[in-house]
Image (tube, helix red, strand yellow):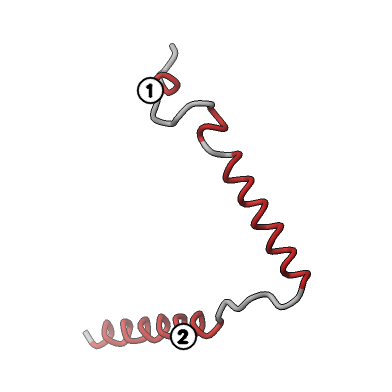
């Protein structure tokens, strides 16, 4: 029983350390123009991927229309 207590205590310490590290890291704004341009390019690429890989773009139908998903044997 003591072993389980020690194990869970160490596990809680590790979790607390991870939460503290992530909370301390912060997500401040990019300070230079190169970083801003990289962020803008990545955001633009993610936006275009979201629009080009959805169900309507791929199959030209809504995903809930049953005929396009029926087995055609």
Q: How crowded is mark 2: few (under 14 residues within 10 Å), some or many (20 or more)?
A: few
Residue identified by numbered label 1: 66
| Image quadrant where one finds the N terminus | bottom left
Where is residue 27 shown, x and y percent of the image?
A: 57, 76
Mark-to-mark CA distance, 2 and 1? 49 Å
Q: Residue at x 43, y 11 (%)?
A: 73
Q: Is mark 1 on a helix, strand or loop?
A: helix
Q: In this view, does 53 lie above or below 21?
A: above
Specify the label residue 56 is tagged with.
none
Where is residue 34 shown, x and y percent of the image?
A: 78, 69
- Residue closer to the observer: 48 or 12: 48
Where is residue 16 shown, x and y percent of the image?
A: 40, 84
Where is residue 71 shown, x and y percent of the image?
A: 41, 18
Specify the label residue 20 is tagged with.
2
**Lateral position of residue 30 relative to residue 18, left or right:** right
Q: Is mark 2 on a helix, strand or loop?
A: helix
How many tags in the picture?
2
């Amino acid at each position: 029983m003591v072993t389980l207590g020690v194990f869970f205590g160490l596990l809680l310490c590790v979790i607390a350390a991870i939460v503290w590290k992530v909370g301390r890291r912060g997500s401040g704004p990019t300070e230079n123009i190169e970083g801003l341009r990289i962020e803008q390019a990545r955001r633009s690429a993610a936006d275009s991927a979201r629009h080009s890989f959805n169900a309507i773009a791929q199959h030209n139908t809504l995903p809930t229309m049953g005929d396009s998903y029926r087995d055609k044997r």
